[in-house]
Amino acid sequence: MTTREDIASVAGQLAGLTRTVEEMADELHTLQKGAVKQQERSNAQQERIDIAARELAEVSARPQAAASALRQAF
């Protein structure tokens, strides 16, 4: 091989490597966007769970208060 052929070969390899790296970067970006969306969904779901737990605690306190009031009445 001549020097020009060596340079052309290395340039071709670098171009291929550059394309591969760009594809990998695109894939990583897509994965990161998916992870962010999943985290947002998880956070929203946790917030709904927390709200439901507070509501359940409030609802369960009502029968207990009623039972206490009935015991005091008798």
Image (spheres, rainbow, N blue to C red):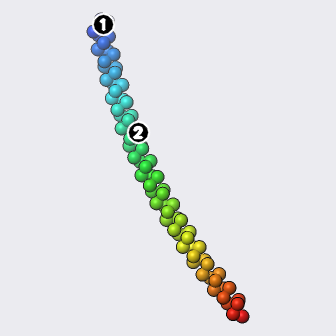
Determine the residue positioned at 34% across, 20% down: 13
Q: Residues within 10 Å of mark 2 (few under 14, many from 20)?
A: few
Looking at the rendered structure, the secondary structure element under dot 2 is helix
Looking at the rendered structure, the secondary structure element under dot 1 is helix
Residue at the spot of label 1: 3
Q: Position of residue 56 (x, y in %)?
A: 57, 73
- Tell me which amino acid carries mark 1: Thr
Determine the residue positioned at 57% across, 76% down: 58
Q: Position of residue 66 (x, y in %)?
A: 63, 86
Say whether residue 36 is left or right of residue 72. Answer: left
Above or below, 67 relative to 18: below
Determine the residue positioned at 56% across, 69% down: 53
- Tell me which amino acid carries mark 2: Leu
User: Splitting the image into 4 quarters, where does residue 17 fall?
Assistant: top left
Above or below, 62 relative to 54: below
Q: Residues within 10 Å of mark 1 (few under 14, many from 20)?
A: few
Q: Are marks 1 and 2 in contact (CB under 8 Å)?
A: no
Quarter of the image with the N terminus is: top left
Say whether residue 39 is left or right of residue 63. Answer: left
| Disc on the earlier residue, 1 or 2 | 1
Determine the residue positioned at 34% across, 32% down: 22
User: Splitting the image into 4 quarters, where does residue 28 fall?
Assistant: top left
Quarter of the image with the C terminus is: bottom right
Residue at the spot of label 2: 28
Q: Position of residue 65 (x, y in %)?
A: 64, 83
User: Splitting the image into 4 quarters, where does residue 62 fall?
Assistant: bottom right
Cα distance between the residues tagged 1 and 2: 37 Å
